Image (spheres, rainbow, N blue to C red):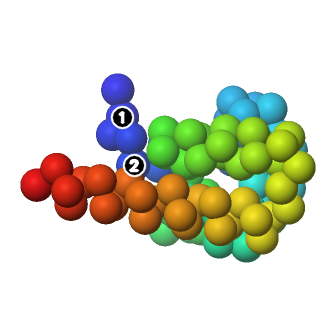
Amino acid sequence: MPKRGRGVYAISVAAEMVSMEIQNLRVYERRGLLQPDRTAGGTRLYSADDIETLHRIRDLLAEGLNLAGIARVLSLEDEIARLRRRLAE
């Protein structure tokens, strides 16, 4: 089983896993919603964490949020997780 943060899935596989078009994944990357790993040749590799983020993006889109709103929600969720980890220390 690969590490959650290590990119192992090609863009076509990642798109199929989350039922999205490949072009959408490229747009989400350009908008800063996720940052897949890259091979030396520039090929995108998506991790299990990236797949989870793509599922979250899909859910937020279904709720009617635009990409700017999704970026804000993801940022706030990351901050909450960071603060919870800090409190647990």
Count residues near mark 2 (Cα–Cα under 10 Å), then give few for <14, some for 14-19, many for 20+: some
The residue positioned 65% from the left and 68% from the top of the image is 72
Task: Say above or below: 14 vs 40.
Answer: above
- In the rendered structure, find residue 2 and report the number of the disc placed on it: 1
Q: Position of residue 89 (x, y in %)?
A: 10, 55
Q: Are marks 2 and 1 in contact (CB under 8 Å)?
A: yes
* Amino acid type of the residue that numbered disc 2 sits on in the rendered structure: Arg
The residue positioned 31% from the left and 61% from the top of the image is 83
* Amino acid type of the residue that numbered disc 1 sits on in the rendered structure: Pro
Q: Quadrant of residue 17?
A: top right
Task: Say above or below: 86 vs 62.
Answer: below
Residue 69 horizontal side relative to residue 32, left or right: right
Residue 39 horizontal side relative to residue 70, left or right: left
Please give the residue where the numbered disc 2 appears in the rendered image. 6
Q: Position of residue 81 (x, y in %)?
A: 38, 54
In front: 73, or 37?
73
The residue positioned 42% from the left and 58% from the top of the image is 80
Residue ranking furthest to the top: 1
Q: Quadrant of residue 75?
A: bottom right
Residue ranking furthest to the left: 89
Q: Is residue 44 visible?
A: yes
Task: Say above or below: 43 vs 72.
Answer: above
The residue positioned 67% from the left and 66% from the top of the image is 71
Residue 78 horizontal side relative to residue 2, left or right: right
Q: Quadrant of residue 15?
A: top right
- In the rendered structure, find residue 75 and report the number of the disc placed on it: none
Q: CA distance from mark 2 to mark 1?
A: 7 Å
Say which element carries label 2: loop
